[in-house]
Each structure stands twice: as C-alpha cells, then as structure tokens.
Amino acid sequence: MKLSEILGAYPHRNLTSVDDIEITAITNDSRKADSGSLYFAIPGARVNGASFIPQTLAAGVSAIVTECSVDELNEFLAGTSLTSLNIPVVQVDSARNAMGLMSSRFYGEPSKKLTMIGITGTKGKTTTSYMVREMLESAGIPTGLVGTIEICDGKNVIPAANTTPESIILQEKLKDMVANGLRACVMEVSSQALKLDRIAGVDFDFGIFTNLSPDHIGPDEHDSYEEYRDCKKRLFNLAKKGIFNVDDEESSYMMENVSCQKLTYGKKEGADFRAAGHELYTQDGILGIRFDLTGKTEGKIEVDLPGEFSIHNSLAAIAVATEMGVPFEKVQEILRTIKVRGRVEMVSISSLFTFMIDYAHNGMSLKSLLLAIKEYNPKRIVTIFGCGGNRAKSRRYEMGEMSGKYADLSIITSDNPRFEEPQDILNDIKTGLARTDGKYVEIIDRKEAVRYAIMHAEPGDIIILAGKGHEDYQEIRGVKYHMDERELVKEVLEEEDVTKICGYRN
C-alpha cells in the first residue's frame, strides 16, 4: 500500500521531502522495523519510541511517524541531521491515535466489515462478552472475540496479553476475522485501551456499559477515579448505539452528552430490558438465578451462574442479541448453559458443597461476589486468595477487610508475588483482616491452601478460590511458572483419600 493511502486525510506534516513509497508492513516495535516498513515512534511511560529511530534507520526502515519536532528528532539522531534522511518522516499530534487510524487503513478498515460490539465497565466485561458471542453463534452469526482471556479470530485462539491489544495487533486480528468469514466481533474495551487510543480506527456498532467502581488507579494506570470514568465514557462517542446499565449510579453520567443512540437495561422501572424480580436456586453444587424479562422482550430467563451481577450481565447480552435479531429461544438456551473460564466457574467436587474459581482480585469485586453468595444462605463461605506483588498495598488491605467481613473463613495464600516476598504480602492482607473479627488461616503455597479448603469442607459450604480466575501461571521473580487452578484441584483429589471429603462424588 502507498504511504499516501495510509496517511489519508489524517492531519500531518512532512518533515522530509521524499516521493510517495510502497509500505509492506507497519510496526511500533523498533526490532521489527526493516525495509518496506512504517515505524510508529510511540512515546511510552518510560521510554520514547523516537529514541530507537537510529536503530530502525540502520535496519533500513522505509518511513517514520512521530510526534517529535525537528529539534527533538535531531537530538535523538545524535549527529545525523534530519534533512539528510532519504525516507519520509511524518509528524502528527498524537502518534497513538494516528497508529490506530492508519493501521485500520493498512488492513482494509476491517471493523467496517464486521458488526462491532464493545463492552466497557469495571466488572462483568468478560462474562458478558462470552454470553453475547455464544448467542450470536447460536443464531448463525460467526463471531470473533477479543478479551481478557483470549482472542478468537475464527481459526485460531490466541491467549491474551492485554484485555484490549495494541491497535496494530487489534486491526490485524480484525482483518483476520474478516478473511476467516466472521460477521461480528465482541470486544472487551479496557480503560487503558480508551486512554491510549488502542481502539482508534475501530467502527463500533454497539457499546455496552456494565458498571463502574474505583479500579486501575495508580502508577502507569489512571491518576484519578474521574480520569478512569472519563476514559470509559469515550466509547459512547465512538459507538452508534449505547446499551447502559441504569441500575449503576454512574449510568446517568455515562449517558450524558454522548452521541450514540441509547438503550437501557436493569431492574429499574422503564428500562428497555428489565428484570422483574428474581429467584435463586441451588442444585448439585451449582448456584443459579431466575428472573422474568420485561420491556422490549418478554419471557422467563434462567442463568446457571450465581448472583445479581449475573442478571445484569445477561440483560446486557440479551439487549445486543435482540437488537441483532437472535431468536429468544436461542437466548434462553445459551443462558441456561453458559460457562466462562474463571468467572464464578464452578468445579464439580461434591454434591454437598460448592467450589468455584473467580477472578475477583480487588476489594470491590470480592465484596460484590461475597454479598451475592450470601444470598444463597450457605453454611459457611470460605475464601482462598492472595494479592499481586509490586502493586498498590491498598488492594491488599481492602481484600483482607472484605473477606474478613463477609466470609466465615479466609485462607490467605500466594498469588503473583512478582518481586516481593509472599509473606510480606500476606502480612499486608492481615492488616486488612485485623480490622474485622474474621477468622483466617495463612498457607503460602497455593496448592496447599486449596488442599486445606477441600479437605476441611463441610456440607453446605461455598468455597471461593479468588484472584487468578482464567490465568494459568504464577509470576515469581520475573518468571511465569505454569499453574492452573483446575489442575491444582485435580491433583489434590488424586493425592488424597477422597472418602474423607464430605459427600465426594466421582
């Protein structure tokens, strides 16, 4: 593709005078920049991509897009004058925004050939995305997925490195979805993706708002809750139609002065997709919820997932599916059978107690989960959790406090210690626990913590293994070691005398 086609009408300034050239690849990784490639010099939190321009020139890069001025570039070039370069160097106001829009052009504007569904919010994005995808697939609409767990492009399933990948990767995967015959894509849209323009160039048909609570506030994330909230809101000026959870107190703010057409869901009167009342059920260790759907669509809904948040997740999915013409019986069928890895994922061990794995990894999400579980009147709620190293200590205090308040027993253990000592992290969690009268046990080894919970389970217990969810690794001293919690459970059952587990069912 010609450079002029990639640049299009995007506002830019040519810092060098060179004829139009053919571009065969685009990248923001200086190590991949070579002959035929366009290099985006992205300013990062710690390093400016422009500092690697000399390496890209040595590798024979064909063109460069940067935010830097002529004087700044001459400093990075260290003795080589910009005017001596025989390649196009293009200056833009935002290299990140330009990279998204130009990546879209380079890959043929793939999002315009798909029905794009973006989901943003603090909690519920992953579960809702799987619900939507399964509903669309069941109705004969081949659908891709971009999310926290994986990217599914219609042929390949790639483990996700970020909730929303960098724009070049995202646009390439959307191009692959089109080539693989997909007609829609459901995508989790993180606040970082919105802040850093990873979704620039994506043409959204639907945007979903799930809920909002303080999260991702701190170094290298968001400076304040207000900035976090405003980043989330940006999606609804990019989408044609917005679908909002009116039960969340921030919904009015999210709907205020945005350009999209608005639909609502929730339990409030007047919601376009409304849950009228609900009933909890427990069967063979499975927790679920039923409710009556009213509004634009009416009928009975049964979801094999626990908690009030399951109502909201399913309502959001129902709204999209209905707008896209999915038959109601398909919607009902999917919700009765939906399972999402690491999101209130129930592991069958015994008919007398419930064991679940969940991604709850901060105080707010753990509190929400525990309050939902309390509605089922378990004999005890037992939590197994830790906290990540090299992250805000406040998260440890909050998780300890929430578990101490709302669980009957907390088993605190190692999560991803990274470059910290696991015992130091546990000590911080105990600071939060000390604000309550909650009982706790500390077992650093995560597998041994799981063993303790299973072997000391009592009939009627609900055991929650929290914090890692879909993740299949443990990060220690910069190295990721394989650790899948489902495998930990399986190993414990293989190693122990299972007749000692209450009501064990093979």
Image (cartoon, helix red, strand yellow):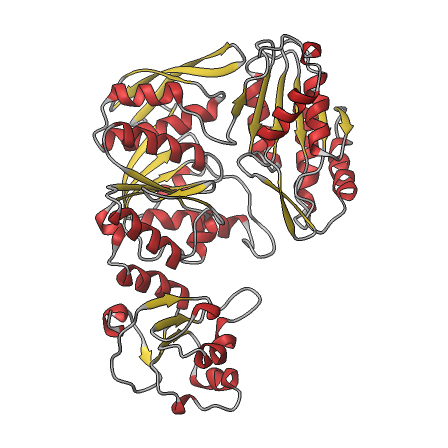
Q: Position of residue 267 (x, y in %)?
A: 39, 23
Relative horizontal placement of residue 134, taking residue 381 as reference (left or right): left
Residue at 59 percent of width and 12 percent of height: 350
Q: Which one is nearer the viewer's eye here, 258 or 405?
A: 405
Q: Would you identify the image quadrant in which residue 485 lies?
A: top right
Q: Which quadrant does the N terminus fall into?
A: bottom left
Residue at 36 percent of width and 72 percent of height: 38
- Residue 407 visible to the viewer: no
Relative horizontal placement of residue 324, taking residue 59 as reference (left or right): left
* Residue 22 vertical position relative to residue 311 in the rendered view, above or below: below
Q: Position of residue 59 (x, y in %)?
A: 44, 78
* Residue 152 vertical position relative to residue 23 in the rendered view, above or below: above
Residue at 59 percent of width and 35 percent of height: 484
Q: Which one is nearer the viewer's eye here, 480 or 128?
A: 480
Q: Which one is nearer the viewer's eye here, 493 or 463?
A: 493
Q: How many marks?
A: 0
Q: Position of residue 179 (x, y in %)?
A: 25, 49
Q: Position of residue 157 (x, y in %)?
A: 40, 42
Relative horizontal placement of residue 485, taking residue 39 as reference (left or right): right
Q: Which one is nearer the viewer's eye here, 500 or 417?
A: 500
Q: Which quadrant does the C terminus fall into?
A: top right
Q: Would you identify the image quadrant in which residue 439 lies?
A: top right
* Residue 28 vertical position relative to residue 242 in the rendered view, above or below: below
Residue at 37 percent of width and 76 percent of height: 35
